[in-house]
Amino acid sequence: MKHRLPLLFALLKFVSGLLLAGYGTYELHRDEYLYLDYGRHLAWGYIEVPPLTALQSWVSLALGGGFFWVKAWPLLWGSLTIYIVVRLAQRLGGGPWAQALAGVCYLTTAYGRVNLLFQPNAFEIFSFTLGIYLLVRHAQPDGQPRHLYWLGLVLGLGILNKYTTFFFGAAVLAALLLTTPRLFARRPVWLAGGLALLVAAPTLWWQLRHGLPFRHHMALLHDTQLVHVTLASFWSAQLLLCFAALLVWVPGLWAALRGQPAPAVRVAGLVFVVGLLILTILHGKSYYSLGYYPALFAIGAVWWQTRLAGRSGLRIALLALPLLLWVPIVRDIFPILPPAAMARLSQRPLHQKLGLNRWEDGQVHPLPQDFADMLGWHELADKTWLAYQALPDSTRARTLIKCDDYGQAGALNYYNRGRAMPAATSFNGSYLYWFPALPARPWRNLLLVGEGHPDELVPYFQEFRKVGEMTTPYARERGVTIYLGINPSPALLARAYGERRTELAAWEGNLKY
């Protein structure tokens, strides 16, 4: 009986997310293609993220790799997260109304969008929420050491998913030191920490063996994206991400820091404060904070339950408010409108003020960046396939397909996965590790996708011509070209493979080759 409402919200989350995922209107997202390619190259680590995403990719591809099997993972983690949120409200003494309010807050905030994309973010939010739930459970009068052990397992899996778990772990450590410092004189907390490191050890070892490419990744991220994150933009985004639940999570934070509705929740408030302070100092992206909010929905809902006892009208109004704020912007935040209609909608003053079309480059574009990154990939893959098919049978096997970035390579491999065609590759991201070695018999053909300065390459080929171009309107990569080069010169191949070694050395801490 106690699981009925949490399970109902979990089911609602999964079904509603599937309906809003944009199937038939949009394609998969650029990043999803990269993560799906992980499933073809299982390892304990990758340049971008740790290996947990790769395991999910392998399962999705084994099941056919269709749209549903890709989206099932973020929807699953979102459903489990909302289950934990509603369950936490229940554990804190919240009745059906408080549980429903906590669940509605999760449904009507930024998690709806995040839980649509096959990225590590969905599991990150789930693991952080579950981690805070276990902290609160341990701090309750009936708390047991097993809750700390489970927390250690969750932190270890979190590190296998995304390295930002270390920031969350630091926030957890600070919260425990501030609330129960005596805990560190006992064995369970150290065993839990050891368990977390044991679970995460394979990917940490992989990082060490490969020269800590995470450092280079963070440096590039800082120089190209985080440099645009200001203190004002980060904190204004915090208000927008969970705006529909503002009247719940803000009182929830205040109540948690005061130890209400129970002293056990103080640790949740401190994790939030320390976690966001760390992200502020490090200029983290605004959505990095999303794992810290869901527990506050539960705490705030229970806090309101006691304040609105006997006021059924106000209870109904507070429960309905997030939905009333969310419904008018559903078209803005979910990929349900065709791109042209979405571009027209984006001209509204409200849309402009919210900055929904401001990309990582700091500029405003016709579509939100995520939407533009879900267009044109199938066209690009089909045109590359046709160009490959047009080659003489005798030279197809000696064809290298090189893309400028991981999105192009991943999309080509995804849409051409059932076709007899060499895997596309790149010098971008983890494709550096998967790039084929220089064969004994040189490449006869090069299909170059997204080559930035094709005119410079003409002298290096016996024949060099354009064979395709992405034309899908509103696609972020509209205009990306496909060039065919026949009989590349040895000098060009030597230079290309030298560039690959140099790039790989940079990722691996400037190792000597």
Image: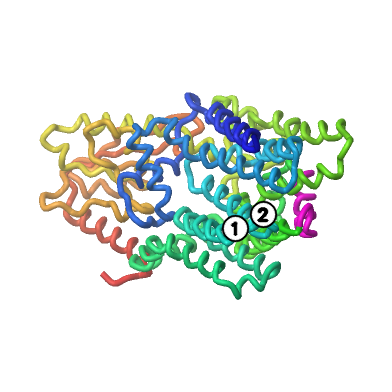
Residue 78 position within the rendered picture, expressed as x and y whole percent measured from the top left: 56, 40
On screen, residue 353 versus residue 421, left or right, reads right
**Secondary element at image label 2:** helix
SS at badge 1: loop
Check the picture and name the quadrant holding the N terminus. top right
Residue sitting at the far front: 142
Q: How is the image coloured?
A: rainbow
Q: Which span is picked out in magenta?
A: 246-262
Question: What's the amino acid at mark 1?
Answer: Gly
Q: Is residue 360 at least partly visible in the picture? A: no
Q: Relative to the observer, which residue lies in front, 317 or 37?
A: 317
Foreground pick, 310 / 339: 310
Q: Is residue 320 visible?
A: yes
Q: Dot 1, crowdedness within 10 Å: few (<14), some or many (≥20)?
A: many
Residue at image coords 30%, 49%: 41
Number of numbered discs on residues: 2
Q: Which residue appears at 77% of the width and 45% of the height?
A: 302
Q: Which residue is mark 2?
A: 234
Q: Is residue 170 left or right of residue 23?
A: right
- Tell whether position 260 is magenta: yes
Which callout, 2 or 1, points at the residue further toward the start of the chain? 2
**Is disc 2 in contact with disc 1, using a CB cutoff of under 8 Å?**
yes
Separation of disc 2 and disc 1 at Cα?
8 Å
Q: What percent of the width, then of the height, locates residue 294?
A: 66, 47
At x 66% / y 73%, what residue is drawn? 182
* Label 2 crowd bin: few (<14), some (14–19), many (20+), radius 10 Å: many
- Disc number placed over residue 435 in the picture, else none: none
The residue at which mark 1 appears reads as 284
